[in-house]
Every structure is written in C-alpha cells, then in structure tokens.
Image (cartoon, helix red, strand yellow):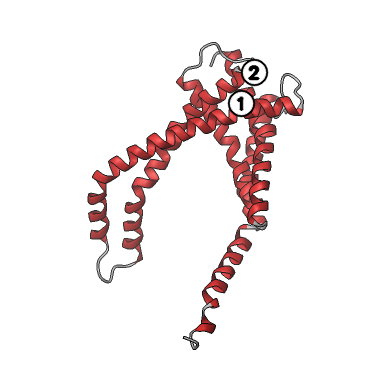
Amino acid sequence: MQNFAPSSPAPASTSIAAGHHLAIFLWNPYAFVLPVALFVVLVCVAAFRDRWAVFRFAIRMTFGQRLYVWWSCAWRQCLANILLAIIGLMAFLFLYRKAAAPIVKLSAGLIKPGAGMIPVMLALAIGAMPIILAALIYMLLSLPFVGYAVQSGLASHALPGPKRFNVSRATLLGLTTFVWSLPGSLMIASVVVPFPDRVADVLRVLLFVVWGMYVVLPRQVRRVARLAEHGR
C-alpha cells in the first residue's frame, strides 16, 4: 500500500491541468469574434431600420423602472420555459423508448471490425439525432411561448402593444428575444471563464441582467411597438 501512495495525486493534478488548459482555450480573444461579429451585424441592421435609435425607449425610464419591466418579462419567460421543458422531456422520453431500439440497431450496424473513422462518426451522429431533433423542436416551440410571456410582461406595465396578439406575432417577438440574447450569452460565457466559480456565478447573473435590461428589453419594446403601429 505504501508503494502506491505517492502516485495518488497524479489524477487530480492531471484533471486540474486539463481544466486549466480548457479555461485558457475558452478565455481567448478569438472566442469573442463570433458573438461580437453577430452583435455588430444585428446593430447595423437595427440602426438602418430605426435610424440609429437602436436601444432607446420611446418613453424615459429610471433604472428601477427598467429593472422592474425586465423582471416582469424575465420571470414569465422562465416559467414558460420550465413548463415547456417538462412537457418536452416527458414527450421525448416516451418517444425515445420506442425509437431507441431501431436507432441503436442502425448505429451498431455501421460499426464493424476494422471500420474507418467515417462510419464511426456517422454512427455517433445517428445515435445523437434524437437529441439534436428534440433540441431544435424545443427551440422552435419555445419562440411563441417566450413571445406571449414578453408581451404579457410589457402589457402589465401599460406599454404600447397590438390589440390582437396571435401566434405569428408571438413567434416574431420570441425570435427577437432569442436573436438579441444569443450574442450576449456567448460573450458572457467567455468573460466569466477565468474567474473562480462563485465569482463567475455572481458575475454571470449581473451581466445577464444588464444585457437584458439595456440590450434585449429595448429591442423587445420596439418590436411590440412596431407590431402595434403597422398591424403586422
């Protein structure tokens, strides 16, 4: 037992080194290229349509009012996503039980002794196809739910909106929310990597709230106001 004692710290040091290398990989200026480029494109398109009033409100709001409106939309979005996730998970587990055997059989048939890398990758892709399809379906179905949640939050503060709010308008508002939230989520995920876990969690929440208040919320308000004005 004493002969094997000195070798025990090796796995821990190896895992720490692996995590350190992963953090260095994620905390890299090039990791910002994609979200920053996406954000710049979105701002340019929005500036062309809104005459550079991209993140302005039609009415003046204090910090407390802006935070209150954001929170009214945020908790409704969170509740809608939780309910949809529960229903989607139950449906996925029910359907996956029936489709698991054919998928596993098809994937196993592609992997043969001496098979190259392409059949193995194809088998893995087929095996992961249900999860990929479920994620895409969930994202598409969540758009109108998010749209209705945001509209309900804005309407609770008597902000201007369309009298009739159907599924297509809710989907468009949900798409606006998703598109403007995506670059912020990617940038925040990269920013908090080098910090300790607790600091990273607090910083992630603060940046998420700030991004939602000053970037996503103005675009949501403008989208709803545009739907009210043009009846689209």
Task: Spot the residue most to the bottom.
Answer: 3
Residue 133 is left or right of residue 188, and the answer is: left
Residue 97 in percent (x, y) is at: 26, 45
Q: Secondary structure at mark 2?
A: loop
Q: Residue at x 55, y 35 (%)?
A: 178
The residue that appears at 52% across and 82% down in the rendered structure is 7
Q: Are marks 2 and 1 in contact (CB under 8 Å)?
A: yes
Q: What residue is disc 2 on?
A: 157
Q: How many marks?
A: 2
Where residue 25 is drawn, which disc sits there?
A: none
Which amino acid type corresponds to the residue marked 2 in the rendered image? Answer: His
Q: Which element is circle 1 on? A: helix
- Residue placed farthest to the front in the image? 1
Dot 1 amino acid type: Ser
Q: Which residue is mark 1?
A: 72
Residue 108: x and y, percent?
A: 25, 59
Q: Nearer the viewer, residue 35 or 189?
A: 189
Give how far apart the Cα atoms at labels 2 and 1 are.
9 Å
